[in-house]
Amino acid sequence: MTSSPDGPVVIVGGGHNGLVCATYLAMAGRKVQILEARQSVGGGASTTGFASGYQVSGLAHILHSLNPKVCKDLKLESAGLKRGEAINTIALDRRGRHLTLGINEVVGAGLAERDIRAYSTFKREFRGYAKALEPLMMNKPPRLKNMDRKDKFTLARLGWGLRFGLGTDSMREFLRVGGINIYDVLNEVFENPLLKGAIAVDAVLGQHMGPRTPGTVLTYLHRLWGETQGSQSLPPGGMGQVAGALAEAATQAGVTIRTGAKVQRILLTGGRASGVLLESGEQIDAAVVISNADAKTTFLTLVGTPELDAMFAHRIHTTRTRGNVAKLHLALRALPIVAGLSAQQLGHRLLIAPDLRYVEHAFNHAKYGEYSEQPVLEITVPSIADPSLAPPGHHVMSVSISFAPYDLKGGWDQQHSIFADRVIALIDQYAPGLASQVVAHELLTPVDIEAQYHIAGGHWHHGELTIDQSFMMRPIHGVAQYDTPIAGLYLCGAAAHPGGGITGVPGHNAARRILAMGDA
């Protein structure tokens, strides 16, 4: 089948980036069909029932980085998007001396005035670094060689933002800290151990990295760039409500969405993508195939290594995509009690990361295929803001757990319940009595995430966001501009630039690239 600007487009996977990409293409007049293996769209941005009467966000549980341009272009508010009230981050302390971290301010018992001032300065400065990356984040990453006009323009805008947007002193500081670890940076700036631990979490969450790992300043900037897109919140109805709005916008634009339609193979004709084969045996022809799946699934499973250059297949195979975050869902018969926090404060983002050493030691276990004895926890209680998620008087708790490696020694089968009990016991130390309030629980290890969400390795971001797997190297050099070595086949998911998070930006950038190439 030859390419045609009017030919049908098939998108493999109905995650949020697939929905975004599909809507942009449909708005441009293309005929687009999304094929989603699960019974609902959204992927990691979904709402799931894990016990009778209890619902919670499946993977991502905090909305903080959905791109404003995407929201405006796709008219997501008209499609039903509700963000929820803005929330802060609260770093928990066993003695009740908690810290509340806002966008620019931090407050808490025993916090030195020096750290209060330093936090405000630090956040403004580092947010400025993140904003300076905007031209790079919102466009296809420039090639490392043979640049076209668009590549040069992106680099020029990036350079202008760094040089004149930051100023000479800030630019020099950015160049100094950009490639080093967050551990050293935080020790230079702050004294309070709890404050340093909380900030470090944002640099390592979802990554196979500890605070001492080189490059964690870059991953922190990736998180901060999301912060520049909007305040963090817990959407009413869970993240599935966000996916629902995206699906509604796609449908209104003319996109056809099919759930329960798992793609078994991407078909090639004469070396060009020409459609897909479903597990049901149905064949669907297409002028263009766009994959919202991770790169390993796309190339090694759906296309197949016999169709690929051996070196290319090897490079895809060796990308680091092993997940390190588990998800725990708790059904509770009552609201937990944490000394020093009101019921309203319990509805914010809660962290258990007492200091930098704690976070680093939690990561050390993952290096050797072990789960953390004292893990780092990110906790939300979304039923406080949205009581419909649980029966009257009951609540749900959603916990992201670092570090829980995909390749656990001895496997997860024998240690699944042990690890869940360990995490519940840890939370109980901060919220005494919580263990006795648990009605039901669900633990999703990276192996479970791989199976349930069809993500190779169970990695939330479809791959590490290290320097060698970011920007013009994501997922690998030569496949960073959304098009692939296979004509008519494109990437639009978190495996592509700029990576993971509920941003919609990979889908936005991929659609622009495909339209610019005249291939859809």
Image (cartoon, rainbow, N blue to C red):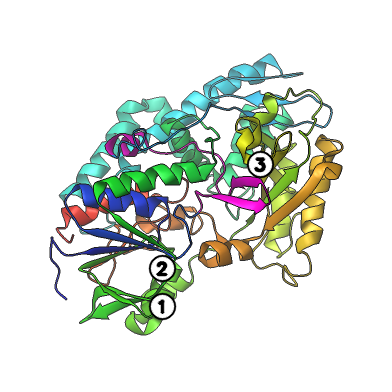
In contact (CB < 8 Å): disc 1 and disc 2: yes
Which residue occupies 23% across, 51% down? 26
In contact (CB < 8 Å): disc 1 and disc 3: no
Q: Which residue is mark 2?
A: 261
Tell me which numbered mark, 3 or 2, is placed earlier along the sequence: 2
**Residue 283 rendering spot, x and y as whole percentages:** 30, 77
The quadrant of the image that shows the N terminus is bottom left
Q: Which residue is mark 1?
A: 280
Q: Nearer the viewer, mark 3 or mark 2?
A: 2
254, 450: nearer the viewer? 254
Which residue occupies 26% across, 52% down? 511
> Most extreme residue toward the bottom, as rendered?
306
Horizontally, is 12 left or right of 386 in the view?
left
**Residue 193 rendering spot, x and y as whole percentages:** 73, 31
Tell me which numbered mark, 1 or 2, is placed earlier along the sequence: 2
Q: Which residue is mark 3?
A: 378
The quadrant of the image that shows the C terminus is bottom left
Tell me if residue 240 comes above or below residue 85 in the rendering: below
Q: Could you tell me the amino acid type at mark 1?
A: Ser
Query: What is the spatial separation of the Cα atoms under label 3 and label 2, in whole angstroms?
Result: 33 Å
* Residue numbers of the magenta segment: 44-73
**Residue 234 rendering spot, x and y as whole percentages:** 55, 35
Q: Is residue 401 visible?
A: yes
Mark 1 lies on a secondary structure that is loop
Q: Could you tell me the amino acid type at mark 3?
A: Glu
Q: Could you tell me the amino acid type at mark 2?
A: Ala
Q: Residues within 10 Å of mark 2 (few under 14, many from 20)?
A: many
